[in-house]
Image (cartoon, helix red, strand yellow):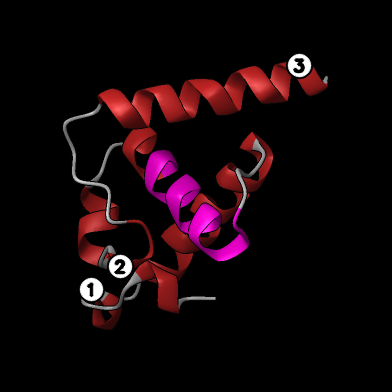
Amino acid sequence: MKRTVAAAACLVMLVAGCSGASNSGGSTSCADFLAMRTDNQDATVAKLLKERNGRNSSTGEVVDTRASLVASCGPGDKKDTEIGDLG
């Protein structure tokens, strides 16, 4: 199980490193975050969590946080809010 989680975390980081999208972590606006593909959202969330916690997060934590941020960014008045300010 730990190997699977570690492999998935490495894959997320690899995709983040290879993606052409800008990854601003917690300073990404909700509008920009919602416009990203899921893999780019995951890379952005992984960077946000590393900024907050000082360590790489598990894939499950990244997925759960992404889902929470998508729900929090949903209301139209939050488009300019930075995802780092949402929790």
User: Quarter-wise, where is residue 18 in the image?
Assistant: top left
**Quadrant that contains the N terminus:** top right
Q: Position of residue 69 (x, y in %)?
A: 46, 62
Q: Compared to 82, does 46 lie above or below?
A: above
Mark number, residue 79: 1
User: Quarter-wise, where is residue 27 in the image?
Assistant: bottom left
- Stretch of the chain drawn in magenta: 42-54
The answer to which of marks 1 and 2 sits earlier in the sequence is: 2
Q: Compared to 66, does 14 lie above or below?
A: above
Mark number, residue 27: 2
Q: Residue at x 27, y 48 (%)?
A: 23
Q: Nearer the viewer, residue 6 or 87?
A: 6
Residue 74 in view, yes or no:
no
Amino acid type of disc 3?
A: Arg
Amino acid type of disc 1?
A: Lys
Q: Disc 3 designates what residue?
A: 3
Q: Residue at x 62, y 49 (%)?
A: 55
Q: Residue at x 45, y 70 (%)?
A: 72
Drawn side of residue 54 relative to residue 22, left or right: right
Q: Residues within 10 Å of mark 3 (few under 14, many from 20)?
A: few
Asked if disc 1 and disc 2 are in contact, CB closer than 8 Å, the reply is no
**Quadrant that contains the C terminus:** bottom right
Q: Residue at x 47, y 28 (%)?
A: 12
| Residue at disc 2, secondary structure | helix
